[in-house]
């Protein structure tokens, strides 16, 4: 799935969260933001979050501390669905 398609697919959820944020911020801080601005801020935040996860993908998937890794169980679940390929020693990928 393309990243932009995914963002389009989650737009209704982001819009719902934006409405909840608008209410919560107004109640807690007395500040009111336009709903459209909050929706855009959430979309930008999500894009930046995805970029940060990609930058740290090795940590989150196999290298880092399990307790600090984001959603490692989902990665392991996806990996378990893959069929490993058999390669000869001469074809092995060099580290």
Image (spheres, rainbow, N blue to C red):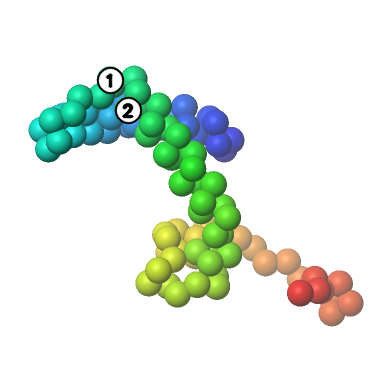
Report the residue that reaches farthest toward the right: 90
| In the depicted structure, whether residue 92 falls above or below residue 13 | below
Residue at the (43%, 40%) spot, across then down? 46
Kindly state the secondary structure of the residue where label 1 is placed. loop
Q: Is residue 25 left or right of residue 91?
A: left
Of 32 and 59, which appears nearest the observer?
A: 32
Q: Residues within 10 Å of mark 2 (few under 14, many from 20)?
A: some
Residue at the (23%, 33%) spot, across then down? 21
| In the depicted structure, whether residue 48 falls above or below residue 93 | above
Between the C-alphas of marks 2 and 1, the distance is 6 Å
Of 41 and 88, which appears nearest the observer?
A: 41
- Can residue 42 be seen in this snapshot? yes
Kindly state the secondary structure of the residue where label 2 is placed. helix
Q: Is residue 88 left or right of residue 28?
A: right
Q: Residues within 10 Å of mark 1 (few under 14, many from 20)?
A: few
Figure quadrant of residue 89: bottom right
Figure quadrant of residue 93: bottom right
Which residue lies under the disc numbered 1? Answer: 34
Q: In the rendered structure, are the residues bearing label 2 and label 1 in contact, judged by CB atoms less than 8 Å apart? A: yes
Q: Measured from the top left, where is residue 64 in percent x and y?
A: 50, 72
Residue at the (25%, 24%) spot, across then down? 33
Report the residue that reaches farthest toward the left: 27
Instruction: Say which quadrant the C terminus sits in.
Output: bottom right
Q: Is residue 23 left or right of residue 78?
A: left
- Can residue 77 be seen in this snapshot? no
The disc placed on residue 38 is 2
The disc placed on residue 66 is none
Of 14 and 36, which appears nearest the observer?
A: 36
Q: Measured from the top left, where is residue 29 in percent x and y?
A: 15, 36
Instruction: Say which quadrant the N terminus sits in.
Output: top right
Report the residue that reaches farthest toward the bottom: 89
Residue at the (40%, 68%) spot, across then down? 68
């Amino acid at each position: 799935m393309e990243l932009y398609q995914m963002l389009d697919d989650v737009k209704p959820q982001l819009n719902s969260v934006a409405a909840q944020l608008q209410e919560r911020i107004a109640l807690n801080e007395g500040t009111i933001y336009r709903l459209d601005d909050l929706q855009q801020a959430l979309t930008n935040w999500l894009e930046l979050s995805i970029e940060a996860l990609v930058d740290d993908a090795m940590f989150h998937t196999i290298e880092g501390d399990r307790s600090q890794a984001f959603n490692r169980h989902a990665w392991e679940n996806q990996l378990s669905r893959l069929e490993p390929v058999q390669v000869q020693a001469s074809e092995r990928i060099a580290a």
